[in-house]
Every structure is written in C-alpha cells, then in structure tokens.
Amino acid sequence: MQSSKKIRLKTWAYDPAADPDSQEYSDKLAALAESDERIAEYEHGGDSHWLHLKDGWIEELMETHTIHETTVEECLIALKNIQKE
C-alpha cells in the first residue's frame, strides 16, 4: 500500500560564483568557434566547455564530434587532434 503523504523538496537557486569547479565563459573559445572552419558551436556548461564540431570533422583520440573539457587550455590541446572523417 502506498502512502498518500506528500514530500516537499527544498530547492535553491544555483550560484555559479559559489561553485569551486565553475569555469568562466571563454571569449577566446567563442571567437575561435566563429573563425575556425571545423567548429560549429561553443557552449559553456558551468564547470566545462564544449566545442561541437561541424560535419566531416572528428576528434581523433576520443572519436567524437564534440570536445568536452574542463579548461580552455585542455580544449586548445584537444583541437590539435581534429581530423577529417
């Protein structure tokens, strides 16, 4: 038999400034996404950066169409492994 008791969860607003793992939005990666023919889009996800590759390009080591790294420097290193499919 199931209980009819309702549970109320406490919610709070997420504050990225208080998150020690939070990474700032990168103007450098955003500009690179605009100018690099291999990159379709740059996304910032709070604690990481995403570079979505255009069709026909792949990150060779992970064999993916997306670079997902914690730091800007790691993204720039991963870009060295981009190859045509």
Image (cartoon, rainbow, N blue to C red):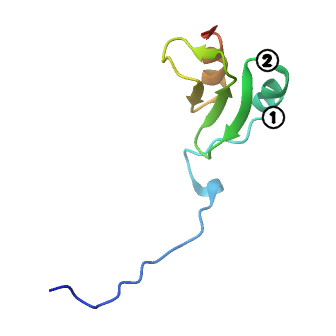
The answer to which quarter of the image holds residue 31 is top right
Quadrant assignment for the C terminus: top right
- Residue 55 in the image: state x and y as whole percent: 67, 21
Residue plotted at (62% across, 61% down): 15
State the mark number for residue 63. Answer: none
Residue type highlighted by circle 1? Asp
Disc 1 target residue: 27
Task: Determine whether the residue tagged by mark 1 lies in a helix, strand or loop.
Answer: helix
Question: Residue 23 or 35: which is nearer the viewer?
Answer: 35
User: Which image quadrant for residue 43?
Assistant: top right
Q: Could you say whether the residue bearing mark 2 is in a helix, strand or loop?
A: loop
Measured from the top left, where is residue 38 in percent x and y? 73, 18
At 75% across and 29% down in the image, what residue appears? 29
For this orientation, the residue located farthest to the left is 1
- The answer to whether marks 1 and 2 mark residues whose Cβ atoms lie closer than 8 Å is no
The Cα–Cα distance between marks 1 and 2, rounded to whole angstroms, is: 17 Å
| Residue under label 2 | 37
* Residue drawn at point x = 65 percent, y = 55 percent: 17
Residue type, label 2: Glu
